[in-house]
Image: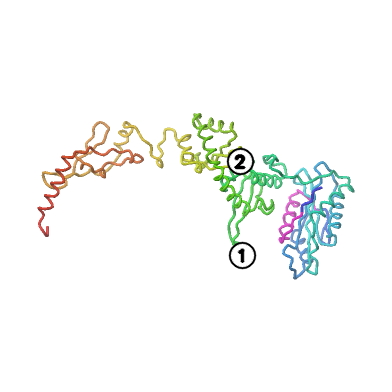
Amino acid sequence: MVAKISLGDSLYGAIRYNGEKLNKEKGRMLDTNKIYNDGSGAVDIRRVYEDFMRWMPANTKTMKPMMHISLNPHPDDRLSDTDYTSLAHEYMRRMGFGDMPYIVVKHMDIDRHHIHIVALRVGTDGKAVSDRNNFYRSKEICRELEREFGLRPAERQKVSPDTPIEKINPEGDLKRQVAAVVKLVGMRYRFQSIGEMNAVLSLFNVRAEMTDGRVNGREYHGMVYFATDDSGTPVAAPFKASRLGKFASRAAIDSRFGRSRDDIADRHLADIVRRRVDDALLQCTDRDTFVSLLKSIGIDVVFRHTDTGRIYGVTFIDHSTMCALNGSRLGKEYSANAFERRFNSVGESVVDTPVPVPETETRDLAPQIEEPAPHAFDPDTGGDAAVPRQQTGNACTVGNAAPGNTDDMPSIPGLDLFHVGPGFDAEEEAFYRAMRRRRRRGRKPGN
């Protein structure tokens, strides 16, 4: 049997968590100690909370006055409600909490039935019951109860770097599965942002979100985790990081970002991934081929799309170097826009990144341009003269535009970088300059 003990300060939250499960027919109240129980198996959350508060001392220095315990027999053990009740009372007595107020609740939301115990750990005198060496004492008591109740030995599964990461099974214990995925992904993979972290988690149907805000004037920065289906849609309410463990906390994740950043830079992992992506790009003809080629060498590609199907994000997850890198970290040519152009923009112009266009295509676009007629200096009159725009076939040209001045050239969106200015004639340019100087010298003061 595996026992998990959590200390906290939210008594109402623990009661509500268990009460809501019971009232949704996913469990039942088995028994209580010094707390009202009507015997129906349901929980009146408000009444139970008020009973607990009657035992709560008015003054105490204990920061976490309540405890939440889960007792988990081996999955192959089948116990009756009476067995579970006896098991809970005996466990609490041997742990030193036999005289404290508590409730015993059976959870049946997963195939592996188990019990939860919500209890006070502070006496009426305001002193906390000693919890010295609770972990070791609990482990020894569990072994004793296994022998006395004829239960199979069960140890908490140890997580190691070699433990396989399994995809979320919606029919199983979601909290346990999400915790396992988050812990193992954090132990193995390197990522520098929440987006890169989610790219890895998405392979196992888990998603993380950062939560920031204010409560009672105090800022908080937390994390919540979702179990999802294959399309990324949540299948249950989110789990707060505090329910999963310290490894899932915002502080732990931020620390992981920093360590990953240094490790990726020191080991030049981005260069390794870039070379592998380049090899796949040279061989691919379409997106499916590209994804397949990378997968064959141990790299998963996660594309993110808008509702219209446009690629707005791409992350490469290299399982050999154990790092997740957004395409933009590899270079501009590996960014989401680059893959959008490569895979989704066939035959479409892309405004944000101009590309060279053949001369025939430039001529086709030119007739659509509406601009004022340019002006040029008239050497006969000494002034500016409007010059009509002349067309040759489909090409739009400017007659007698001032040589060397491309400001008056029609602007074609997306092709400005590839305009060729009008021909330059040195003698004609010298003539124009001379005429301008002569005109300025001929002006009278006051005119």
The type of residue carrying mark 2 is Met
Q: Nearer the viewer, residue 417 or 42?
A: 417
Q: Nearer the viewer, residue 177 or 417?
A: 417
Is residue 40 visible in this depiction of the protein?
no
Q: Nearer the viewer, residue 140 or 207?
A: 140
Instruction: Name the residue beneath numbered marker 1.
Output: 216
Question: Marks 2 and 1: which is nearer the front?
Answer: 2
Q: Residue at x 58, y 39 (%)?
A: 317
Span shown in magenta: 5-29
* Lateral position of residue 45 relative to residue 251, left or right: right
Mark 1 element type = loop
For the C terminus, the image quarter is bottom left
Q: Residue 115 in the image: state x and y as whole percent.
A: 80, 51
Is residue 360 visible in this depiction of the protein?
yes
Instruction: Name the residue beneath numbered marker 2.
Output: 322
Q: Residue at x 80, y 42 (%)?
A: 75
Which of pointers 2 and 1 lies earlier in the amino acid sequence? 1
State the CA–CA distance, disc 2 to disc 1.
41 Å
* Lateral position of residue 216 relative to residue 62, left or right: left
Numbered badge on residue 124: none
How crowded pointer 1 is (Cα within 10 Å; few <14, some 14-19, many 20+) is rated as few
